Image (cartoon, helix red, strand yellow):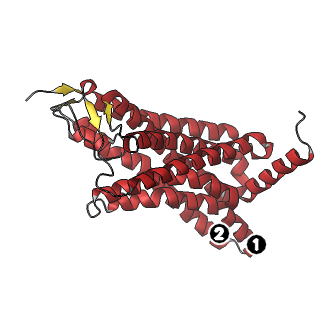
Amino acid sequence: MYQVWGSLFTVPFLGFSGIPHMRYYYIFLFFVYIISLLGNSCLMLVIIMDRNLHTPKYLAVFNLSLTDMCESTAVIPQLLDMFLFGNQLIPYGLCLCNMFSVYVFTSTQSLTLAVLSFDRLVAICLPLRYHMIVTHRSMLVIIGVMWAVALLIVITATVFISRLSFCRVIVIINSFYCDHGPIYRSACSSNFPSYVIAKLSPILILGFPAFFIIFSYTCIAVTLFRITAPQDRKRATKTCTAHLIVVAIFYVPITFTYALSSIINTNTRIINLSLTSALPPMLNPIIYTFKTEEFIISLKRLFKRRIIFPSPK
């Protein structure tokens, strides 16, 4: 038995194997990717152009839109290249780059949703102190810390997995991206640090943000029940609608997929996870456009400005 260091072997991907008519699914993902790029680019452009949206909340929305676009770019083009064009054998170094980018942007998506729930928590439960607590500076610090935490966790995972050695020149991964779990489990050398990271990172990246979001909306629900005026209650509820839909789209599929992983077959799990990676970045800008009143007002204002006062040629 001989050992091969990670940098010396290649990784073939066997996701979506044995499923008929998958070419149509890849074409669907391509259009989803294009819509995601256009939608998130437009959302970020409106936030940049309208000074009324230069608020702490929309700093977080801008960050979510940016990470959505980056996560789609990390997943879908690589997936199409591997499975639509047949380039399923990639060098280990490129595999690690793919793993790093997918996990960083997925982590920041999850953490950004928790940041947005914090914004809603303070806005509804502590409205008189909102502008003292949620400032541009505090939001930038929170977003900076969030990125630092995501990068620290993923860099640590990548460093430990890059030091593993393997007993085969080719390590097969039954997934649509360079998945951390199948790689470290294929190692011949001690993989205990990677095992610990694999168990802790979902708790830190998905569990804690989800718990904080549930806690935030529990507090928000209690506060809403105390509001006597129906109009005020309805107005406060409407400010949370877009965020709640985005949270459900992101967390519910991931939760069910991992909770039922022992029951569902591999291909079902892979398709569910690929849709979880592809659909939220496409739907988020649509949801924030049509479900957020202040964003609709800003959009109308920008269109009127361009029609009535067009830029000189």
Can you give x and y, in whole percent of width and height, for residue 201 in the image?
37, 44
Q: Which residue is mark 2?
A: 224
255 in relation to 52, above or below = below
Query: In terms of secondary structure, where does tag 1 sit?
Result: helix
Is 133 on the left or on the right of 107, as rendered? right
- Asked if residue 114 can be seen in this view, the reply is no
Can you give x and y, in whole percent of width and height, for residue 167 in the image?
15, 32
Is 141 on the left or on the right of 184, as rendered? right
Q: Amino acid at mark 2?
A: Leu
Can you give x and y, in whole percent of width and height, for residue 124 in the image?
67, 60
Which residue is pictured at 72% across the width and 48% down the height? Answer: 131
Q: Nearer the viewer, residue 207 or 275?
A: 275
Can you give x and y, in whole percent of width and height, for residue 299 in the image?
78, 51
Q: Nearer the viewer, residue 18 or 102?
A: 18
Mark 2 or 1: the one toward you = 1
Q: Tell me the quarter of the picture where residue 293 sits.
A: bottom right
Which residue is pictured at 63% across the width and 45% down the height? Answer: 38
Local packing at callout 1 (Cα closer than 10 Å; few below 14, some 14-19, many 20+) is few
- Asked if residue 31 can be seen in this view, the reply is yes
Q: Amino acid at mark 1?
A: Gln
On the rendered image, what quadrant is the C terminus found in? Answer: top right
Q: CA distance from mark 2 to mark 1?
A: 11 Å
Q: Which residue is mark 1?
A: 231
- Whichever of callouts 2 and 1 sits on the residue coming sooner in the sequence is 2
Which residue is pictured at 38% across the width and 37% down the height? Answer: 99
Local packing at callout 2 (Cα closer than 10 Å; few below 14, some 14-19, many 20+) is some
Q: Nearer the viewer, residue 273 or 216?
A: 273
Is 305 on the left or on the right of 257, as rendered? right
Mark 2 touching mark 1, by CB under 8 A? no
